[in-house]
Amino acid sequence: MFYGEYEHTLDSKGRVIIPAKFREIFKEHYVERFFITRGLDQCLFVFTEEAWKNQEKKFRELPFTKTEARQFNRLYFSGACEVIADKQGRVLIPDYLKSYAAIQVDVVIIGVSDRMEIWAKDKWKEFFDTNKGNFESLAEKLITE
């Protein structure tokens, strides 16, 4: 559903515009609100409401008696916020999420199938440069025929 890589900047009020291609997908699938939370590798995960409910169901099933499950759920869900884009397609990212992802002004928004990720531009460049050489070996390890 979400594919590609787009560079944007936060405006003076700390809002970021969702890429036009993603806004088209929202229209096609009648998506009005979505959820942003702490992601892995110091980025932010952005889910449609439907995808968020799937994530919530999966993580709710983790046994709360396990320390790791409690810790993960606390960090993941306490960081979540529900957002609705304005008419220009902008969303306000809360300060605590910008801080978590080290976002100042320049961001990269990427599509990762069922979710979007928002990265500080320098963090995305660092992640990409570090991992692009592993692309083929990751494919060998993860993709079976």
Image (cartoon, rainbow, N blue to C red):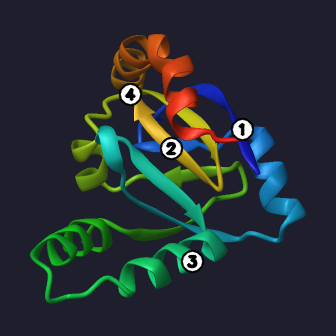
Q: Nearer the viewer, mark 4 or mark 2?
A: 2
**Relative image position of residue 107 (x, y in whole percent):** 46, 29
Q: Nearer the viewer, mark 3 or mark 4?
A: 3
82 sits to left or right of 99: right
Q: Residues within 10 Å of mark 1 (few under 14, many from 20)?
A: some
Q: Is residue 55 above or below residue 63?
A: above
Residue closest to the far left: 67
Disc 1 target residue = 3
Q: Which of marks 2 and 1 precedes in the sequence? A: 1
The disc placed on residue 117 is 2
**Relative image position of residue 83 (x, y in whole percent):** 52, 67
Q: Nearer the viewer, mark 2 or mark 3?
A: 3
Q: Nearer the viewer, mark 1 or mark 4?
A: 1
Disc 3 target residue = 54
Residue type at tag 2 = Glu
Disc 4 target residue = 105
Q: Element type at marker 2?
A: strand
Q: Residues within 10 Å of mark 2 (few under 14, many from 20)?
A: many
Q: Which of marks 4 and 1 precedes in the sequence? A: 1
- Looking at the rendering, which quadrant does residue 25 occupy? bottom right
110 sits to left or right of 65: right
Q: How far apart in space, not on screen, are marks 1 and 3 (Cα)? A: 20 Å
Q: Nearer the viewer, residue 133 or 85?
A: 133
Q: How far apart in space, not on screen, are marks 2 and 3 (Cα)? A: 17 Å
- Looking at the rendering, which quadrant does residue 42 occupy? top left
Kindly check if marks 3 and 4 are in contact, taking CB atoms under 8 A apart as contact.
Answer: no
Residue type at tag 4 = Val
Q: Residues within 10 Å of mark 3 (few under 14, many from 20)?
A: few
Q: Nearer the viewer, residue 8 or 76?
A: 76
